[in-house]
Image (cartoon, rainbow, N blue to C red):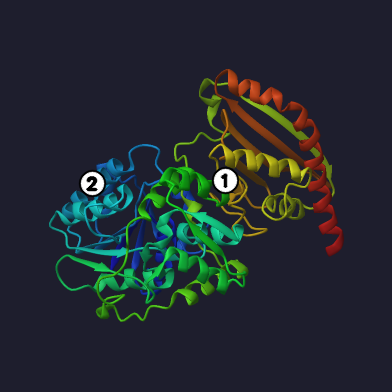
Amino acid sequence: MRVAVAGATGYIGGRLVPQLLAAGHEVVCLARTPSKLADRPWTDNVEVVSCDVTIAEQVNAALEGCDAAYYLVHSMGDPADFAQVDRLAAENFRSAAARSGLQRIIYLGGLGSGSDLSKHLSSRQEVGDVLADGPTPVTELRAAVVIGSGSVSFEMLRYLTEVLPVMVTPRWVETKCQPIAIRDVLAALVASLDDSPGSHVHEIGGPDVVSYKEMMRCYARVAGLPRRLILPVPVLTPRLSSLWIGLVTPLPVGVARPLVDSLRNEVTVAGDPIPKRFGIDPIPLDDAIRRALSSDVTLDIPSRWSDASTSPAQVFAWDPDWAGGTLFMDRKEVRSKAPATDLYWAFARIGGSVGYYTQNWAWRVRGVIDTLVGGVGLRRGRRHPEEVRLHDTVDFWRVADVQPNEHLQLSAEMKLPGDAWLEWRIEDEGSERQLVQTAYFRPRGLLGRLYWYSLLPAHRLIFGRMVARIAQAGEQRHASSA
């Protein structure tokens, strides 16, 4: 079949595409930012179409000629009303599916029932209803907590359990849920292409029904951690809980809040964990956690929750005239005899466990400050200790541009009174190379200018040493391999 995947740059979509290719399907990836897919190992085997699902004309063109489509789009992190955005996008997709004569839409939604669903779960189920309110048959899979390396649910579970040996928690830790392994979610999505005629809602989950408290203790047991002491108290509101989660996990408060609000709803499957027609034997929770941890160790993480951009319309450092705004720059240069491959290796591994080559304590303090004001902090780390690809997250940065052995630009995602970038560029000068490191800052208002000038002493202390030590690291690597 010719299958469209809306949301191919996301956590689920990024893992589903290779599964569809392996099953012999022709895949069309719909992406608001197609460049995000430029360096995926399967990019050459798919067709990539620029498509914003909130723009009807683009969806109509993208689905033309397709037999089926996956709808894996969700705007929960959107600063606007995510329910309204999701409703509009689903309406556009439903209409485009009818125009193009799709045989089926497959949608991954959320478990839950009753009239007291959270705004997040209500929106997820409303999207399924909107998609099904048309002539195209819809298979809606409803899942709860997805356990897999890099998933938002797994990252929240992991950080809460690993960071806090003693937890004072809200009452929602006693709520029952039915977590499911990412492996089984993907298998169910692929199997849904052959669903029986008509529209269907299938609830899917793993074989274990547990409370969130039991799930955290299961993680601690599998990870080899001491038993966690969990003390539920009635006074922690969803808002306070989301602020606490934002402090001790990589999740920004804007993402944590709707998730926490949903934890009060029991999310379990009414019948079989996965419909028998799919032929899937779901794996237990402890096996799912063990597989996710194993993927982290082997660095086999094809997608992460943070792959989605926090600011899709962000201005990059090469945009002309900076839209008429002021641009501050701090440029440092150093000459080196190391080859470009070794210099690139040195700055491409920055952040994460490697650190920033100088004054790492200062970077950690900056990360703590960012976390306290609701930013992402340093806790997102890196997908891989040495490799970077476009749109990867590196602590509180995102890779805005990368040219192997030539150039790397990081865009800041910490809370700032302006926009910031940090880049390295290698200029070949015959027998030597010039390593150029530049920090850019576009301030917003007076506060942004005061922020830049207040950091000038720190910049002089840190940036000059940083570029020198990056060059030194490249030279040492070259010498050791000679």
Is there any visible trace of residue 180 in the rendered image?
A: yes
Whole-number angstrom distance, CA of label 1 to CA of label 2: 30 Å
The picture quadrant where one finds residue 142 is bottom left
Q: Where does the image place residue 355, in percent across and percent down from the top left?
A: 72, 50
Task: Establish if 279 lies above or below 40.
Answer: below
**Residue type (three-letter) at the residue carrying disc 2:** Asn
- Taking 182 as reference, is 244 left or right? right
Quadrant position of residue 161: bottom right
> Is label 1 in a helix, a strand or a loop?
strand
Instruction: Give the amino acid at mark 1.
Output: Arg
**Residue where numbered disc 2 is placed:** 92
Question: Residue 96 location in percent, x, y?
Answer: 21, 50
Q: Quadrant of residue 482?
A: bottom right
Residue 54 seen in this snapshot: no
For residue 186, above or below residue 12:
below
Along the line of sight, which residue is nearer the eye, 184 or 272? 272
The crowding category of the residue bearing disc 1, from other C-alpha atoms within 10 Å (few below 14, some 14 to 19, many at least 20), is many
Give the numbered dot on residue 145.
Answer: none
Choose the circle earlier in sequence order: 1 or 2: 2
The residue to which callout 1 is attached is 398
Secondary structure under tag 2 reads helix
**Tag 1–tag 2 contact (CB < 8 Å):** no
Whether 216 is drawn above or below 343: the answer is below
